[in-house]
Image (tube, rainbow, N blue to C red):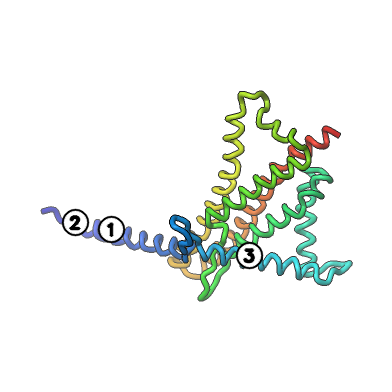
């Protein structure tokens, strides 16, 4: 009979411990509370709760910023005006003035929801399990599909049936490849957002278990930047998707 050496036994115990930490961190981050509403159809209640909390925070921020509008802004109003002006400059550069007027409400709402949702799971919480709604692939995919549908609706409104001409560009034989590209765009957008936020939350949970407070607090600052960058990237990709619509409208005029 072969006997396992002490070093191997220690290695196995260490590996089991690390696996236990990883599993515990994953269970801490991944959404729980799944309820089956119909055979084969389940709702993740925690995702729904965190989505509603995100919308409530966004609505509260907008209400606080617009409740008493001052000529010289300060506080929340000043912060919101900075965000709006920054997004408007981004849209002016890519969509033009007309495109900015059409897209501003949608782009602003999208950015605020993703930004607030990203940061919820990265903030320290005691006794309350907070998790970003965007670390659920269903939410991320829902956002990207919403962007795709909104792009088609705005395209048809602005250009009419001519909007679908891009599916047969540069020639009709490219139709299958162009359709695949259209389907791949929302999928890649969703996976990018979902993967980055989920990985950040899992790593943060692992750090809290291994070295509480010091390193995790440093990582929180970095994660907050990541949450902002992911919201910016998703919003920027949305603006880029809308850009050809308004460029074509401008060229026709």
Left or right placement of residue 29 versus residue 69 in this view: left
Residue that numbered label 3 is attached to: 54
Q: Point out the tag, 1 or 3, that comes first from the N-terminus.
A: 1
* Residue 141 position within the rendered picture, expressed as x and y whole percent measured from the top left: 57, 50
Mark 2 residue element: loop
Say what secondary structure mark 1 lies in: helix
Per the model, the C-alpha gap separating discs 2 and 1 is: 10 Å
Residue at the disc numbered 1: 12
- Residue furthest out toward the bottom: 127
Look at the image and tell me in which quarter the C terminus lies.
top right
Q: Alpha carbon of mark 1 to alpha carbon of mark 3: how far?
A: 42 Å
Q: Quadrant of residue 81?
A: bottom right
Seen from this angle, which residue lies furthest front?
A: 38
Which residue is denoted by mark 2 in the rendering? 4
Q: In terms of depth relative to the viewer, which is nearer, 220 or 232?
A: 232
Kindly identify the residue that appears in the image at 80 percent across and 55 percent down. Answer: 85
Front one among 10 and 123: 123
Residue 201: % across, % down: 52, 60
Q: CA distance from mark 2 to mark 3?
A: 52 Å
Q: Secondary structure at mark 3?
A: helix
Q: Which residue sits at x=24%, y=59%?
A: 9
Could you tell me which residue is drawn at 58 percent across and 39 percent down?
183
Which residue is at the far left? Answer: 1
Label 1 crowd bin: few (<14), some (14–19), many (20+), radius 10 Å: few
Taking 199 as reference, is 205 above or below it?
below
């Amino acid at each position: 009979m072969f006997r396992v050496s002490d070093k191997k036994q220690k290695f196995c115990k260490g590996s089991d411990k690390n696996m236990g930490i990883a599993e515990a961190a994953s269970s801490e981050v991944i959404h729980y509370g799944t309820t089956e509403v119909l055979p084969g159809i389940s709702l993740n209640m925690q995702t729904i709760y965190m989505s509603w909390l995100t919308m409530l925070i966004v609505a509260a921020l907008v209400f606080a910023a617009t409740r008493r509008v001052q000529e010289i802004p300060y506080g929340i109003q000043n912060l919101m005006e900075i965000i709006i002006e920054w997004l408007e400059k981004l849209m002016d550069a890519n969509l033009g003035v007309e495109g900015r007027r059409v897209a501003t409400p949608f782009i602003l709402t999208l950015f605020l929801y993703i930004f607030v949702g990203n940061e919820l799971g990265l903030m320290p919480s005691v006794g309350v399990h907070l998790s970003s709604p965007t670390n659920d692939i269903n939410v991320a995919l829902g956002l990207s599909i919403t962007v795709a549908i909104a792009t088609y609706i705005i395209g048809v409104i602005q250009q009419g049936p001519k909007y679908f001409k891009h599916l047969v560009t540069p020639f009709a034989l490219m139709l299958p490849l162009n359709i695949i590209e259209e389907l791949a765009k929302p999928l890649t957008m969703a996976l990018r957002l979902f993967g980055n936020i989920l990985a950040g939350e899992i790593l943060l949970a692992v750090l809290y278990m291994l070295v509480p407070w010091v390193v995790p607090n440093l990582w929180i600052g970095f994660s907050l930047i990541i949450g902002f960058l992911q919201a910016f990237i998703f919003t920027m990709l949305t603006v880029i998707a809308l850009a050809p619509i308004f460029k074509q409208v401008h060229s026709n005029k």
